[in-house]
Image (cartoon, rainbow, N blue to C red):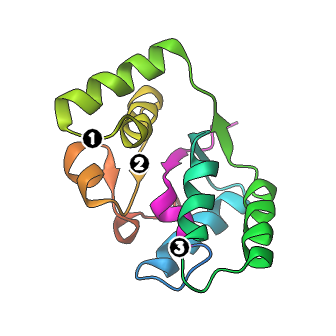
């Protein structure tokens, strides 16, 4: 049985699942491929907090919409990877070497560790990681 390809996503992509932003169509395609079992989305567990915080600051967000978004995010069953000593150490190294926050570097470290792409719309992360691609360059598997 063939292994399902893994793809790391960050909160900049997750926000596009809920908000009408540039690149939302591609981000929704990524989410749908995960829901259909064509790929497996994964992220450091901190994505849940980053996503909820980003949505909370959107001017059109209400308490009910935010609660629904958080519930729906967990319903997606993205593989949330808890921090580990080696992974956090690698994220810290990447952060120092590439002038990123440790938060952002944790996505790059996870993609590096798993040998998979990181789909992000964060320009600093795109410039800092050779595994990072914008949603517009993600191609669904055949």
**In the structure shown, which secondary structural element does the residue marked by tag 1 occupy?**
loop
List the residue tagged with mark 3: 16
Q: Position of residue 137 (x, y in %)?
A: 34, 66
- Asked whether 31 or 15 is in front, the reply is 15
Q: Is residue 120 left or right of residue 95?
A: right
Residue 66 drawn in magenta: no
- Residue 18 is drawn in which quadrant? bottom right
**In the structure shown, which secondary structural element does the residue marked by tag 2 occupy?**
strand
Q: Are marks 3 and 2 in contact (CB under 8 Å)?
A: no
- Residue 43 is drawn in which quadrant? top right
Q: Position of residue 118 (x, y in %)?
A: 41, 48
- Front position among marks 3 and 2: 3
Q: CA distance from mark 3 to mark 2?
A: 15 Å
Instruction: Determine whether 105 is above or below 134 in the image.
Output: above
Q: Which mark is residue 134?
A: none
Magenta stretch in the rendered image: 1-16
- Asked whether 107 or 66 is in front, the reply is 66
Q: Is residue 6 visible?
A: yes
Q: Is residue 28 left or right of residue 128?
A: right
**Residue at 63% over, 28% down:** 82
Q: CA distance from mark 3 to mark 1?
A: 22 Å
**Residue at 62% over, 43% down:** 4
Q: Residues within 10 Å of mark 1 (few under 14, many from 20)?
A: some
**Residue at 64% over, 50% down:** 48
Label located before the other in sequence (3 or 2):
3
Q: Residues within 10 Å of mark 2 (few under 14, many from 20)?
A: many
List the residue tagged with mark 2: 118
Instruction: Determine whether 135 is above or below 78 in the image.
Output: below
């Amino acid at each position: 049985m063939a292994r399902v390809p893994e793809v790391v996503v960050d909160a900049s992509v997750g926000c596009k699942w809920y908000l009408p932003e540039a690149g939302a169509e591609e981000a929704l395609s990524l989410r749908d491929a995960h829901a259909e079992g064509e790929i497996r989305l994964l992220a450091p567990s901190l994505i849940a907090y980053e996503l909820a915080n980003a949505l909370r600051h959107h001017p059109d967000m209400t308490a009910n919409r935010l609660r629904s978004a958080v519930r729906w995010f967990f319903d997606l069953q993205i593989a949330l990877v808890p921090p580990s000593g080696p992974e956090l150490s690698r994220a810290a190294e990447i952060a120092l070497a590439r002038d990123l926050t440790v938060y952002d570097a944790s996505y790059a470290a996870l993609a590096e560790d798993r040998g998979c792409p990181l789909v992000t719309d964060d320009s600093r992360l795109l410039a800092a990681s050779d595994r990072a691609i914008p949603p517009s360059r993600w191609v669904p598997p055949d």
